[in-house]
Amino acid sequence: MKQLKTLSLLFTLIICGCSHLDKASDFITNPTAKEQYKRNFNISNELFEIWENSAKTAFQDSVSVTLPYAETGKFFPKSFPVYSYEIHLQPGEVLDLSIKTDSVNQLIFAELFEKTNDSIPEFKKVTGTDFQKKNLKFEAEKSATYKLVIQPEIEAHTRFVIEIEKKPAYLFPVSGANNANIQSYWGANRDGGARSHEGIDIFARRGTPVLAATDGRIGFTGEKGLGGKQVWLRDRKRRQLLYYAHLDSIANVSGNVKRGDTLGFVGNTGNAKTTAPHLHFGIYKGYGGAINPLYFVYKTEKSETNQSISEITALHLIVGSSKANLRNRPTTAGSVILNTAKAGDTLQLLGKSKNWFHIRTSNNQASFIHESLVRFQNPLSQESIN
């Protein structure tokens, strides 16, 4: 009995030791989430290769979405689905991905790639989800097209909701105001076309608090030049200066400030004396001069996810019309027809976004098809769905 207890203790120590060794090794080698998945779940090389190769089809896809975007559906074991979405981001926009599943134990992998060449598309990975995480945030530093690739684990069997949004990196700089208060934009003519507007104008009542859009350090407060009473805030994280102009008065601020602190109050000092009170908000990036501040503060509406996942009752769809257009976006407005399907064609069902099914054809091309053009093939039993 004593010998059995000793062996059990040794076995426990070995298991714990292996776990600690893995963690120590990970600290040095920094394996990807997918590499950790293969190791931790003892996935065979052959099966893992099939799974990884299925992800490569994403780079042949041309599916594009406008944010915010939401998709619902179900993952089924060993069906090897891959989801990819091309998304355009501007400097100051933050991509915010959230994937919700019925089971917290289901592993989902997401990777974001920058499209570096338009004529012959090339993709460079910029970030990915951490192991066992289902969310991802990425702040764009330049105007570019990105491809988001999502892939569930091999044995995934769960309902899912994918939500992709873009949010501003900064807090809106005028208290109680929103997008509707922006009434003059970057690039607008000034002085009869002699110069262009290097910022945005946010109109509000005189005396409305003007807020620090981010944590930073005050660089200058005072009254001078065209901007009248003004505050300059240094954003050290992004190495840029935030310019608040035409203030009615300046708050008693200096040194470091926190996001949301009051810097001053809306007015029309400087060369804005003949206009209604507003904040001129500008951003200056290092030695590159002024950049468009709009996307740093512009808010987009949250996506709708009120559609029922129970609507999806099969792994495949059958085309019911004589001809069905397959589009690169879930809309007829401004979308491109990638291909056409004919009556009787079978399509792999990936998910649904409002009235559009996200599908993959027999030759592995992803696209969207309107729900009115298809029907479910051999609906699954409720037990299989659950």
Image (cartoon, rainbow, N blue to C red):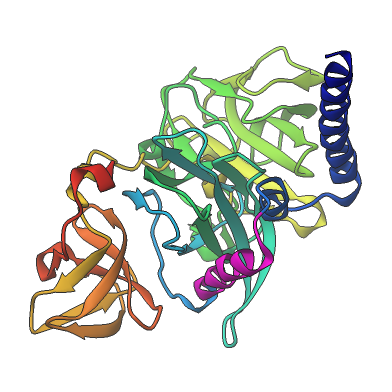
Looking at this view, is 322 or 283 the one in front? 322
Question: Is residue 56 rendered magenta in the image?
Answer: yes
Q: Nearer the viewer, residue 131 or 247?
A: 131
Decide if residue 50 is on the left or right side of residue 362: right
Residue 116 appears in the figure: yes
Give the residues in magenta. Answer: 43-58
Query: Is any atom of residue 141 visible in this view?
Result: no
How many numbered tags mark residues here?
0
Which quadrant: the C terminus? top left
Quick one: 143 or 246, which is closer to the camera? 143
User: What residue is drawn where x is 16% and y is 72%?
Assistant: 318
- Give the answer, above or below, for where 294 lies relative to 361: above
The picture places residue 95, in percent across and down from the top left corner, at: 54, 48
Horizontal and vertical percent for residue 223? Answer: 71, 28
Taking 356 as reference, is 295 left or right? right
Q: Is residue 88 left or right of residue 228?
A: left
Quarter location, residue 81:
bottom left
What residue is rendered at 62% in x and 34% in y? 245
Q: Does residue 50 belong to the magenta stretch?
A: yes
Looking at the image, residue 372 lies above or below residue 303: below
In the image, residue 155 lies at what x, y percent? Answer: 48, 51
